[in-house]
Image: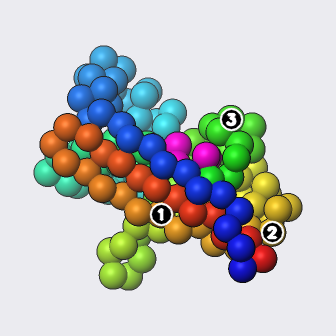
Amino acid sequence: MRVFGIGIDVVEVDRIASAIERHGGPFLTKIFTPAERDYCESRKNPAMHYAARFAAKEAVSKALGTGIGGNAGLHDLEVVHDAAGAPKLRLSGAAEAFAKQHGITDIQISLSHARDYAAANAIALAE
């Protein structure tokens, strides 16, 4: 197995909170899947959790080398949780097809958040 790419991103929680306040549902629906929205809304500080997931999507798009767009749409990159509660990434659509085409077999992510900032890193692994 080899490293295909590495990505990192940092997001200001207030930036996401402001976007939610200004645009509400349309902003959230455009960027996050229903499961991501349900998870974030169930938390004490939803904006902090949304910011971490946005950072994860950006970090993964960098690890893939695609950026957000044609080969990695925002809904194609979904943060889910394993049985122990650890964040995992689920690919679908164009991002999943891109990963298969390039032999990417796994993408590891790590999320972190505090009052003001959320960060994520991603490592894409290929055969």
The residue tagged 2 is 103
Q: Main secondary structure of the magenta part?
A: helix
Give the number of the mark in front: 2 or 3.
2
Q: In the figure, residue 9 lies in which quadrant?
A: top left
Secondary element type, mark 2: loop
- Give the number of the disc on residue 69: 3
Could you say where residue 122 lies in the image, as x and y percent from the top left? 52, 59
Which quarter of the rendered picture does the C terminus lie within? bottom right
Whether 114 is drawn above or below 81: the answer is: above
- The residue carrying mark 1 is 109
Q: In the displayed structure, would residue 31 be above or below residue 107?
A: above
Give me the residue at 24% from left, 29% from top.
14
113 and 48: which is toward the camera? 113
Residue furthest to the top in view is: 22
Magenta residues span 58-62
Q: Secondary structure at mark 1?
A: strand
**Amino acid beneath label 2:** Gly
Inter-mark Cα distance, 2 to 3: 20 Å
Q: Which corner quadrant of the image does residue 4 belong to?
A: bottom right
Which is nearer the N-term, disc 2 or disc 3?
Answer: 3
- Name the kind of residue labelled 3 in the image: Gly
- Disc nearer the start of the sequence (2/1): 2
Examine the rendering and report whether any part of residue 90 can be seen: no
